[in-house]
């Protein structure tokens, strides 16, 4: 069985503007087996810290572009590179957060219990939402949240969780992709992210945001507490693409227009998923 994902990008007002898009990522559940572009041409370039390859798409003037992915069921696992920490303002924990994370971990009987405790502590600090100002905007480090509930998206929640886990000495990776809710019949509006930990060879997946959406802060390991399915696109935060003039971009997931000053800007997208049909039919 295969999963086929189509992402249609509406034209930019600047007919010469290019966009960047990840080409897919293997997981224990799926393996990317096909990537192509209709309505434009593409070339490949690399990210300097993680080694990820992405596509740079040049649309045909005034035309929408369709990005097409295919994933086969079953996969080799997450790449080792997702667990390698890279210090930047999106990943480095502030001193108070380091102290808190270590204190939480040291009160637990073993590493697996410590990871669960750090996940639970993170879940207790957030309510799901999209705040106009993110909790770490303007910060050079991921700040400690001491009390009360902070409004945050999956990006915000997992930024805090990754910083906490790594501050306590645990291997953790940040994943981006698309999640297709069961009730939307193969459609979604934007990207999603989740966290993977690895301790003593055991890989576990965590999705706090979906637990919060389902009305609980009792977070257990595993994906999809909210019914649906997902595909992985890319990983890590604070990414650089020298050939494009992009330095320390927060993350990559859905297609982003490359601005003249080396930043990624949102594109207008239509995202859909078909399971079981051929790539041409998808």
Image (cartoon, rainbow, N blue to C red):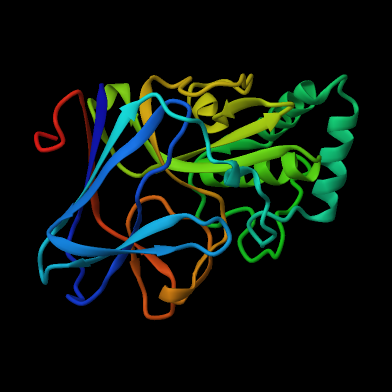
Quadrant location, the C terminus = top left
Q: Quadrant of residue 257?
A: bottom left
Residue shown at the point (43%, 28%) measured from the top left: 75
Image spot of residue 246 (x, y percent): 47, 72
The residue nearer to you, when weighing 228 against 86, is 86
Image spot of residue 231 (x, y percent): 37, 35
Image spot of residue 217 (x, y percent): 62, 23
The residue nearer to you, when weighing 104 against 110, is 110
Question: In the visual, does 200 lie left or right of 260?
Answer: right
Question: In the visual, does 225 lie left or right of 162?
Answer: left
Question: In the visual, does 213 lie left or right of 93?
Answer: left
Image spot of residue 43 (x, y percent): 29, 65
Quadrant location, the N terminus = top left
Q: Is residue 208 above or below residue 57?
A: above
Q: Is residue 180 above or below residue 246?
A: above
Q: Quadrant of residue 152?
A: top right
The answer to whether residue 157 is visible is no
Question: In the visual, does 77 lie left or right of 278?
Answer: right
Residue shown at the point (51%, 31%) measured from the top left: 77
The residue nearer to you, when weighing 22 against 97, is 22
Q: Is residue 74 above or below residue 44?
A: above
Q: Quadrant of residue 33?
A: top left
Q: Is residue 91 above or below residue 118?
A: below
The answer to whether residue 61 is visible is yes
Q: How many marks?
A: 0
């Amino acid at each position: 069985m295969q999963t086929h994902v189509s992402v249609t990008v509406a034209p930019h007002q600047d007919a010469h503007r290019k966009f960047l898009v990840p080409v897919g990522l293997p997981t224990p559940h799926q393996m990317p087996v096909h990537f192509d572009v209709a309505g434009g041409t593409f070339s490949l370039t690399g990210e300097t810290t993680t080694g990820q390859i992405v596509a740079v798409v040049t649309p045909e003037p005034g035309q929408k572009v369709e990005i097409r992915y295919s994933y086969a069921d079953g996969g080799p696992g997450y790449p080792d590179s997702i667990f390698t920490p890279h210090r930047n303002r999106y990943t480095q924990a502030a001193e108070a957060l380091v102290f808190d994370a270590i204190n939480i971990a040291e009160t637990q009987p073993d590493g697996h219990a410590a990871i669960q405790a750090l996940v639970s502590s993170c879940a207790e600090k957030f309510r799901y939402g999209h705040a106009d100002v993110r909790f770490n905007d303007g910060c050079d480090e991921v700040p400690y949240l001491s009390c009360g509930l902070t409004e945050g998206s999956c990006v915000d929640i997992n930024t805090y969780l990754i910083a906490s886990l790594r501050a306590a000495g645990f291997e953790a990776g940040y994943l981006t992709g698309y999640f297709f809710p069961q009730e939307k019949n193969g459609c979604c509006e934007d990207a999603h992210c989740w966290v993977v930990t690895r301790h003593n060879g055991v890989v576990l997946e965590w999705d706090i945001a979906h637990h919060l959406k389902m009305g609980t802060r009792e977070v257990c390991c595993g994906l999809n507490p909210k019914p649906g399915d997902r595909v992985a696109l890319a990983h890590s935060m604070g990414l650089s693409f020298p050939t494009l003039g992009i330095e320390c971009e927060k993350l990559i997931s859905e297609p982003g227009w490359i601005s003249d000053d080396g930043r990624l800007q949102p594109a207008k997208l239509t995202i859909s998923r078909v399971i079981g049909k051929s790539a041409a039919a998808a």
